[in-house]
Each structure stands twice: as C-alpha cells, then as structure tokens.
Amino acid sequence: MATAGIVAAGAVSAAGAADLPNAPIYKAPVAATYNWTGFYAGGNVGYGWQNRSASFVGTDASTVGAALLTGGFGGTVAGPASFSAKGVTGGLQGGYNWQVNRNWLVGLEADFNWANVNGTGNSAFDVAPGAAMTIAAQQR
C-alpha cells in the first residue's frame, strides 16, 4: 500500500483549471537604434575682444630708423600705441552624414566663419620741436 501511495504521489502534476487562460509571457521590447543619416545645418554668433599694445619698428633711439623719424632736429621717438580690439563673429555650417552601421558614421561638412574684430591706436611724436606727427596702428 505504501508503494501504491508513492507511485500515486509521483504521478500527480500541477493541476490547472480548464476555464482559465494561460498567463501571457511578456518580453522586453527591442531597443530602437537611432539612425544619424541625413542633412544638418547650424549657425554660431559670438563676440571677441582684446587689449593690445603695438610698438613701431625703428622707434628705438639707438636705431637709424629713430634718427630718420626724428629727422635729426631734436624731435621725440614714437612710443607704443595701446588700443582695444572688439567686435562680432559669426558663421554657418552644414553637411550630410551616412550611418554605415551602428559604430561608424561618415559625413561631409562645409563651414564659413566671419569675424569683425577691429581696433586702432595712435602714437604721437615730434619730428622737430612744434612739428607733431601721429603713427596709427590698426588690428583686424
């Protein structure tokens, strides 16, 4: 009888009701990969500035240029000109990319940038007593 009970217990399996549906099996969705193929365009705008000091060639009193500059008439040597350069910058860029596979991207790009950063400064000197001149420095 014990043997019959063990055999009967081993033959029993999980019971399920015939009127209940099986629970659905959910799988994680496959992550969509982004495709970078296509055209793009953009722009940029900025502002630039700097402070400069320009020295002029031949303004050292020991050079021939300084002797010519002062004309040998007791004038002064031109000192450095200090100035601030400032202005707007901007540009455009655009291109096309091809995504070859998930690890490689190939593309062509063209860009154009422009700057309008300008500054001027002046340095006054005398070629002779009472005969003033000015040297102008410009940076662009």
Image (tube, rainbow, N blue to C red):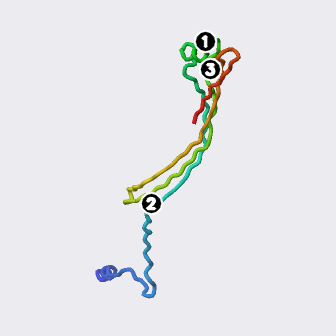
Q: Which residue lies under the disc numbered 3?
A: 78
Residue plotted at (62% across, 34% down): 119
Quarter of the image with the C terminus in it: top right
| Residue 136 to residue 130: above or below | below
* Disc 1, SS: loop
Instruction: From the top left corner, tell me how far across and down residue 122 is, in percent.
Output: 65, 27
Quadrant of residue 70 within the rendered picture: top right
In this view, the residue farthest toward the right is 130
Residue plotted at (30% across, 83% down): 4
In this view, the residue farthest toward the bottom is 19
Within 10 Å of disc 2 (Cα), the crowding (few <14, some 14-19, many 20+) is: some
In whole angstroms, how far apart are the C-alphas of marks 2 and 1? 72 Å
Which of the numbered marks, if any, corresponds to residue 72?
1
In whole angstroms, how far apart are the C-alphas of marks 3 and 2? 60 Å
The answer to which of marks 3 and 2 sits earlier in the sequence is 2
* Disc 3, SS: loop
Q: Tell which of 1 and 71 is nearer to you.
A: 71
Residue plotted at (50% across, 52% down): 93
Instruction: From the top left corner, tell me how far across and down residue 88 is, in percent.
Output: 61, 43
Would residue 135 appear left or right of 21 to someone viewing this image? right
The answer to which of marks 2 and 1 sits earlier in the sequence is 2
Q: Tell which of 102 and 60 is nearer to you.
A: 60
Amino acid type for the residue under numbered disc 3:
Ala
Marks 3/2 in contact by CB < 8 Å: the verdict is no
Amino acid type for the residue under numbered disc 2:
Trp
* Disc 2, SS: loop
Nearer the observer, disc 2 or disc 1? Answer: 1
| Residue 140 to residue 33: above or below | above
Marks 2/1 in contact by CB < 8 Å: the verdict is no
Which of the numbered marks, if any, corresponds to residue 36?
2
Q: Tell which of 40 and 139 is nearer to you.
A: 139
